[in-house]
Image (cartoon, rainbow, N blue to C red):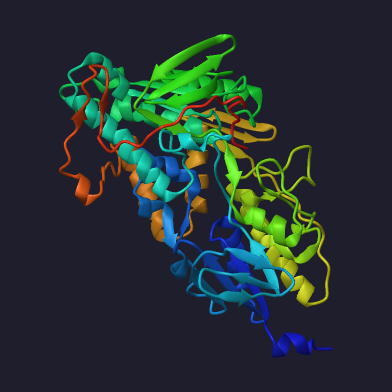
Amino acid sequence: MKNTAIETKPHRVVIVGGGFGGLYAAKALGKSQHVEVTLIDKRNFHLFQPLLYQVATGKLSPGDISSPLRTILSAYRHVRVLMDAVIDVDPQQQQVTLNHTTLPYDTLIVATGVSHHYFGHDQWEDAAPGLKTLEDALEMRKRIFGAFEAAEKESDPERRRAWLTFVVVGGGPTGVELAGALAELAFHTLKDEFHHIDTTEARILLLEGLDRVLPPYPADLSAKAAASLKDLGVTVRTQSLVTDIEDDIVTVRQGEQTEQVRAKTILWAAGVRASGLGKVLAARAGAQLDRSGRVIVNPDLSLPEQPNIFVVGDLAHFAHQGEQPLPGVAPVAMQQGAYIAKLIQQRLQGKEMPPFHYDDVGSLAVIGHHAAVVNMGRFKLWGFPAWLIWIFVHIYYLIEFDNKLVVMIQWLWSYFTRKGGSRLITWEESRLDEPMVVDQEPQRVERHDAPERSSGEFKAPVIAES
């Protein structure tokens, strides 16, 4: 017997977030004539977050790791794309509130991801930017290359050392990859481009609160990663807690010892915090949140009290497989997005679906020019072979073909020449002619518009990202 409800009224699916989870759900559902999909995102592009650090260090351009959502979904006639922000959810009326309108749904998929977390010290954000958005990467790029430019003009040795000191807080995959890329930049890419400073005198300090870098990886691969970082020239400090960031001074506690490190460039890669929509779901839909603000979901990724609201990707706390919740990585979000799409289609046919199960494809982290670590259960690799696998995996997951071709060419060029792809420093036009203001105190150099920084003790450990 035909289902007349399907024939007369398409099922309305609203997807919030154009990351991997939302995009994979939209593409899978967009093939069905019985479903109308609306994808909502604050930006008009999909971002390949695993390569953000390469934009921050000038190896790739922003367009190399991003694709317009409308372009990606243009072939799916039943998918509508809206550039807007969801500010409220009404489960009783089954509608979401955008900035200037409301939108009804039959099924809601929330995939808004996470941002960086300062563990109660949000005032550190101005001094130590994180790396979750394209804007974050461009801000980091400006600070990194601006530091070398400022050092080139600096005559005072102590101030020059501060400009050439880079502190990366957090020894998870992002921190390890960022520190390795900074070392390649300072010790190879830029070493012949400045005539008044020696960029190989740069100090790159990687701080991790736990006892090893890459804590989610097996101990032997963590040790390989640490050794590769040291070979590149990175100073790795584990069991080191950041207690304060103020006036270009990072206060670090290691055991009973406390040290102050003067650095003009401080980069944050120490933890994540869920998007604000998690709190909305808690208040409006009875969702439970974990300590990071992620939404605790059922085995089918739905909310306990709302079977037609699903949470996928980094925002979802899925603890139904293994001892730990699933990590916030792209393959998890991809599989969850595809699963929800199939579940919706099965429900429309009156069929049931088994709980979601993640097929672990392993984890990878790159360290410098031609080294990486790969963890695939019993299969472990490091060094150059792991680096090759890392390249082809990341190329495979880039969304559009033109992006894959451009990135492959950029990487090949970078590998053989050690030259970056996009090392532009961009400022607001009104600031281009502003002079550097030298304070009367002999030990400080600041721009006159430098943000104020607050102090405070950070008692929680620096936790590596999952």
Residue lying at 76% horizontally and 58% vertically, measured from the top left = 286
Q: Is 379 left or right of 163, judged from the image as shown?
A: right
Question: Residue at image x 63%, y 22%?
Answer: 220
Q: Quadrant of residue 55?
A: top left
Does residue 179 appear to the left or right of 307 in the view shown? Answer: left
Taking the spot 74% from the left edge, 57% from the top edge, the residue there is 301
How many labels sit on residues? Answer: 0
Would residue 300 be visible to someone looking at this image?
yes
Q: Is residue 233 left or right of residue 321?
A: left
Furthest residue to the top? Answer: 256
Quarter containing the N terminus = bottom right
- Residue nearer the viewer, 203 or 414: 203
Name the side, left or right, on which 231 lies relative to 198. right
- Asked whether 421 or 293 is in front, the reply is 293
The picture quadrant where one finds residue 413 is top left
Q: Position of residue 215 (x, y in %)?
A: 63, 28
**289 w.r.t. 230: above or below:** below
